[in-house]
Image: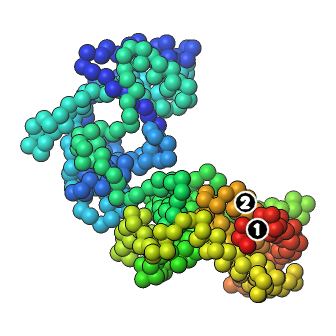
């Protein structure tokens, strides 16, 4: 569940105003009976969860008393996951969701918060709850029950209403004297300054006006690490993203970070970078099996429905999908096992350290504009060729094997990632080339997906030789995929021409 709320600071003398003017026509504001909530927050000894904007708590009286709250990119919006369980050790499922923050450190009670809550529902004309307004008097307690602090705050949480309603409620509260507060969770205020120190995972900070090559490498590593670790809980939950999946994004993070470590290898100490690349390759491989099953299941339905004038046997398509679903379940089980392994914990620790301080060589101290073009030129020339030798593209044959086209795809991805990593420093030409290379990658990605799908449909049918309807359906699906392969190969030269024009690549020469 996604929680969206806004906080306001008030003092003890504040009087909550009449909120009915914020309700829509036909709506009303209804008070709920006051309650007292007692919440125990658990964390590591050095407050790794709180410092990362994450909370794990047990609150007495809730139907599902254990709750994890995970931050999103938008302040005030958090992922909230609740489960049943007694006070004590948190449920294993929720403890797993904070793996990348805790990284194996023991979880123990860190804060006890008592809240006297007066809550009000803002209702729509049909009685639906559009928003909730709570007036909280909060007391923080020591282990012996003595008071260590107190404050008062208002929270406005969006339910089925829109953000315009939250704006109206906020206006009424501010007119009454409430102050729009920074979004600081209760337990962080309770824990004090130690909970507001920097998180262990260093976020990208942007580049200085005249960056060194090391500045660019450090920023690229931090972006890559964040992309890997921030998708960990979403992979565990199976949360769908906007038109994508967490498994895919986590895998992309692994592959892109590996690519950056390879591109910038002369600027990184080999004994530090190589083991990290190897472990990222392991994790990307585990995620890849699950991702491949995702892609194939989605492609099966699209390919089967591609020609409504020539429909396929729906029962046979369902049998193919069932086989893929079984494959996907096995792959996801392997992902879960990997994410719970000591090897993965060690990798996460290494990634956190990498984001804090990549191990750079002396060459990284040189100006980025002097060092980076030559580094990026290497993957580009492996793809496009140079004065001395042809690149991978030159060896492509419209009738050649799929494997050669796949090799060009891999080299194209390396070149694209390298160009994208330096584009913020090297200017508009690099940015335009990165965008055109993405289009090349889209074309080659469609080629690879179609080629793999054709082989898969035939292999699944071959595994059940007595199922003649399945064989016919798989054969027709494979024909459609091979037609896509031929179409993509015909489209490739135009996409490559747009990417490789001299005006886009002259900065590499």
Pick the residue in front: 160 or 326: 160
- Whether residue 108 can be seen here: yes
Q: Secondary structure at mark 2?
A: helix
Q: Which residue is mark 1?
A: 506
The residue that mark 2 highlights is 429
* Quarter location, residue 471: bottom right
Disc 1 on helix, strand or loop?
helix
Residue at horizontal 64 percent and vertical 54 percent from the top: 243
Q: Please say if the residues under marks 1 and 2 sit with CB atoms less than 8 Å apart.
A: yes
Judging depth in this view, the residue of 219 and 84 nearest the camera is 219
Locate residue 361, reporting x and y percent: 45, 76
If you read the primary sequence from the N terminus, does the residue marked by circle 1 or circle 2 appear first? 2
Residue 45 sits in quarter: bottom left
With 424 as the anchor, is 397 left or right in this view? right
Task: Give 455 or 222, whichever is nearer the viewer.
Answer: 222
Which corner quadrant of the image does residue 377 belong to? Answer: bottom right
Q: Is residue 429 above or below residue 40?
A: below
Percent x, y of residue 392: 76, 82
- Please say whether residue 402 is visible from this viewpoint: no
Residue drawn at point x = 36 percent, y = 73 percent: 346
Crowding at label 2, few (<14), some or many (≥20) Cα neighbours within 10 Å? some
| Residue lying at 61% horizontally and 57% vertically, measured from the top left | 424
Q: Is residue 151 above or below residue 230?
A: above
């Amino acid at each position: 569940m996604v929680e969206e709320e806004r906080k306001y600071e008030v003092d003890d003398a504040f009087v909550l105003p009449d909120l009915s003017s914020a309700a829509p026509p036909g709506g009303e504001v209804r008070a709920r009976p006051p309650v007292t909530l007692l919440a125990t927050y658990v964390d590591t000894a050095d407050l790794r969860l709180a410092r990362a904007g994450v909370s794990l708590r047990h609150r007495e009286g809730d139907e599902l008393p254990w709750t994890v709250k995970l931050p999103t990119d938008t302040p005030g919006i958090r992922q909230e996951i609740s489960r049943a369980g007694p006070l004590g050790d948190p449920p294993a499922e929720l403890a797993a969701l904070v793996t990348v923050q805790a990284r194996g450190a023991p979880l123990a009670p860190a804060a006890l918060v008592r809240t006297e809550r007066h809550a009000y529902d803002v209702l729509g004309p049909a009685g639906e709850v559009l928003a909730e307004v709570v007036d909280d008097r909060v007391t923080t307690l020591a282990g012996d029950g003595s008071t260590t602090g107190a404050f008062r705050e208002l929270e406005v949480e969006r339910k089925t209403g829109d953000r315009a309603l939250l704006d109206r409620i906020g206006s009424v509260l501010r007119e009454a004297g409430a102050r729009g507060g920074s979004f600081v969770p209760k337990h962080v205020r309770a824990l004090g300054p130690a909970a507001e120190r920097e998180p262990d995972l260093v976020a990208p900070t942007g580049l200085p006006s005249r960056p060194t090559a090391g500045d660019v490498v450090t920023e690229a590593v931090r972006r890559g690490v964040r992309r890997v670790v921030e998708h960990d809980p979403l992979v565990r939950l199976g949360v769908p993203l906007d038109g994508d999946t967490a498994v895919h994004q986590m895998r992309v993070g692994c592959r892109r970070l590996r690519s950056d470590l390879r591109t910038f290898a002369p600027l990184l100490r080999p004994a530090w970078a190589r083991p990290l690349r190897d472990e990222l390759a392991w994790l990307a491989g585990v995620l890849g099996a699950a991702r491949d099953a995702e892609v194939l299941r989605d492609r099966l339905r699209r390919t089967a429905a591609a020609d409504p004038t020539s429909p396929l046997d729906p029962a046979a398509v369902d049998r193919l999908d069932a086989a893929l679903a079984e494959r996907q379940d096995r792959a996801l089980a392997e992902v879960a096992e990997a994410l719970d392994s000591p090897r993965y914990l060690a990798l996460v620790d290494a990634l956190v350290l990498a984001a804090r301080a990549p191990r750079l060589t002396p060459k990284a101290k040189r100006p980025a504009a002097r060092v980076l073009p030559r580094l990026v030129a290497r993957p580009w020339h492996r793809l496009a060729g140079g004065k001395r030798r042809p690149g991978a593209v030159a060896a492509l044959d419209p009738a050649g094997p799929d494997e050669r086209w796949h090799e060009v795809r891999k080299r194209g991805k390396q070149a694209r990632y390298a160009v994208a990593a330096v584009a913020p420093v090297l200017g508009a030409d690099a940015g335009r080339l990165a965008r055109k290379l993405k289009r090349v990658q889209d074309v080659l990605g469609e080629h690879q997906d179609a080629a793999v799908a054709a082989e898969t449909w035939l292999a699944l049918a071959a595994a059940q030789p007595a199922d003649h309807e399945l064989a016919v359906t798989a054969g027709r699906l494979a024909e459609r995929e091979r037609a896509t392969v031929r179409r993509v190969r015909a489209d490739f030269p135009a996409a490559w021409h747009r990417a490789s024009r001299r005006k886009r690549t002259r900065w590499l020469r």
